[in-house]
Amino acid sequence: MAVNREERRGGVSARGSGFFYRRPWAKLLLLLLPAVLWLVVLYLGSIAGLLINSFWSIEEFTGLIDRTLTLSTYQDLWVPYNRDIVLRTLFMAAGVTIACAILAFPLAYYMARYATRRGRFVLYLAVLMPLWSSYLVRALAWRQIFAREGVLYWSLGKVGLDGVLDTLIRAPMVGGSSLIASKISLFVVYTYLWLPFMILPVEAALERVPGSFLEASSDLGARPGLTFRRIVLPLAKPGLIAGSIFTFSLTLGDFILPTMFGSSEFYLGQQVYTQIGVVGNTPLAAAFTFVAMAIMIVYLMVAKRGGAFESL
């Protein structure tokens, strides 16, 4: 009997192997099926569910969700309060992206063109090391730095510049009741957290700039500024756009930092979290998420035209 069971087991195994040998497409399908299910069912399915939810509404008196399809939730997005949230988030995301690009480019250029092999390793380590610690740990560290009794106030006080910081805090549009409660702190922390996501793609793009192009430009009498504008910057543009996708989208969807820094004004991710977790208005939260998605779709289309995906 034991021999018969072994023979049957071997027969099933041989038939299975033969089936997949004769049909290689079936083996490929079996290997790809989990990833395809994850992408189609979980990701696209959840997006479709969210889209349907955004066309529902909430009854004012009962607070219950009315599943009748309507555009009233999207009309609520044009209320000045909600519109300001979208614009505020857009300006913050654009500002952080520009600041990251300005800060990242010199370092990425040095890493790509001048750093020795060991120096490049050290710089890679310095860029990547902050990513090994928790996002919240780094944010909390900045709260300690920005506190009234923190190292920033202490350092500026030692050189007599603490008044400059107080003047900045009192500035309209970006100031607040304290440094932590101002837009300045939120902007600085966002820039710090997302900077590695800009440095790495820019450095990768700059590494691919042929040195012969720069030598030819110099031999033809072009000044360094002209070489930078006509050769380096255009060839580095895909890396800049690729990095900006990360910095822009991460700022656009974040909801944690605005609760730790900045004023009481809401941002897009924070509003989505509040509508789901506090108010219970999931249709409006879904509509807000589609605003963010629409912005990113437009942004990605522009990035594709700039050749950003060649650097990813």
Image: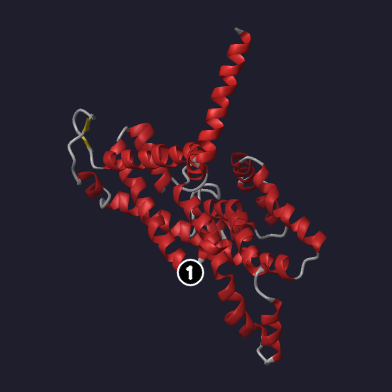
Residue 217 position in % (x across, y down): 66, 86
Quadrant showing the N terminus: top right
For the residue pair 210 and 156, the one nearer the viewer reads as: 210
The residue located at (67%, 65%) in the rendering is 108
Going by the image, does 23 lie left or right of 123? left
Vertical placement of residue 191 versus 44, above or below: below
Residue corresponding to mark 1: 306
Callout 1 amino acid: Gly
Vertical placement of residue 36 versus 231, above or below: above
Residue 300 position in % (x across, y down): 43, 60
Going by the image, does 61 lie left or right of 173? left
Residue at the bottom extreme, as displayed: 221
Q: Answer whether residue 99 is visible to the viewer in this image.
A: yes
Vertical placement of residue 230 versus 31, above or below: below
Q: Residues within 10 Å of mark 1 (few under 14, many from 20)?
A: some
Residue 2 position in % (x across, y down): 62, 9
For the residue pair 170 and 257, the one nearer the viewer reads as: 257
